[in-house]
Amino acid sequence: MQKEIAWVCSLNHHPEHNGWFVRIKSGVRLNPMDKLVETTREQLRDGNNWCVLTTYKENYALLSAFVSYYRRRYGIESFLLLCGLPGSRTHASLKELISKKLKAAAAAASDKTQITRRKRALTVSEFAGDGFVVWVASYAAADFTSEVDFHDLKVDLHQWADDFLPMRITRTLAPDSDEFLHAKNPRSLESLDRLGFHFVDVIPSPVWPPDKLRFSLQGWYYRRQAQPRFKHGGRLALAIAKMLGRGLDHRGCKTFYFDLELAYGKSRA
């Protein structure tokens, strides 16, 4: 049921070309840098109650497409970018970079300094556009962060976000910055507290513009198929594979928790 409601497309970039392509509907090819997705009539009933949270560390190539997609597909007008600053990157240079990416948004004159529950210092800027707002919170970051440390970091940052976001924000989406959640009917998310979903990758085209789009499930789905019983078990293995989900492994799948009260146990009434 869930996999029929939504899936996520992760974009891959071809190094020899400057465009990004994603298929949102079967048989439709769109350039997200120009026209990512046609505005749907079934946007969220009240996008003002939602905010998209995501993290960045030096790769902002998809920022404008990311904001455009969630605005036009879902009607969400609030975004919170949690940005690590490694090396010589400063908050001032980050603001300049984001201003170039979000040409329709102007940065507020002053920044704010805030502290997370774990005493992490954040510098926060606000970019306001025509009907939408983007908050950018930066923090000092190492060039490499382990998986365990990054998990702890995200928990700290998301707890701060819960305190920071206006009270009108009661529901969030928290995809990675290269993930585009596609729901057949965005309003189906309004009645859900959580949702698990599948990933597909766009396979870069060797020619530009692409004459054909190809997609692939991400690699972690096929872990079971590497096991000897599936490689050498013949028809019996096929029957077992079908019983277990055709050899797919769903332990790498993500789950969105939309309701902030459920995510952090805090009432926003």
Image (cartoon, rainbow, N blue to C red):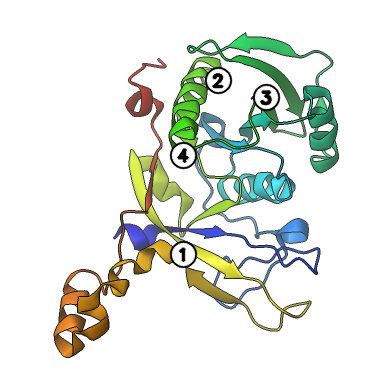
Tell me the number on the disc at residue 165.
2
Viewer-side residue, 63 vs 120:
120
Name the amino acid type tagged 4. Answer: Glu
The residue to which callout 4 is attached is: 147
Q: Nearer the viewer, mark 4 or mark 2?
A: 4
Circle nearer the N terminus (1, 3): 3
Give whichever of 7, 38 is nearer the camera.
7
Which amino acid lies under the numbered mark 3 shown in the image of this protein?
Ser
SS at mark 2?
loop
On screen, 16 above or below 187?
Answer: below
Which of the labelled discs sits on residue 218, or is there none?
1
Question: Label 4, label 1: how many angstroms apart (C-alpha)?
Answer: 19 Å
Q: Is residue 187 left or right of residue 236?
A: right
Q: CA distance from mark 1 to mark 3?
A: 30 Å
N-terminal-most mark, 2 or 1: 2
Q: Position of residue 156 (x, y in %)?
A: 48, 22
Q: Dot 4 surroundings within 10 Å: few (below 14), some, or many (20 or more)?
A: few
- In contact (CB < 8 Å): disc 1 and disc 3: no
* Residue lying at the far bottom of the rendered structure: 235
Report, in whole angstroms, how far the alpha carbon at label 4 lies from the one at label 2.
26 Å
Of mark 2 and mark 3, the one earlier in the sequence is: 3
Query: For residue 80, what is the image quadrant?
Result: top right
Identify residue for label 3.
138
Q: Is residue 188 left or right of residue 112?
A: left
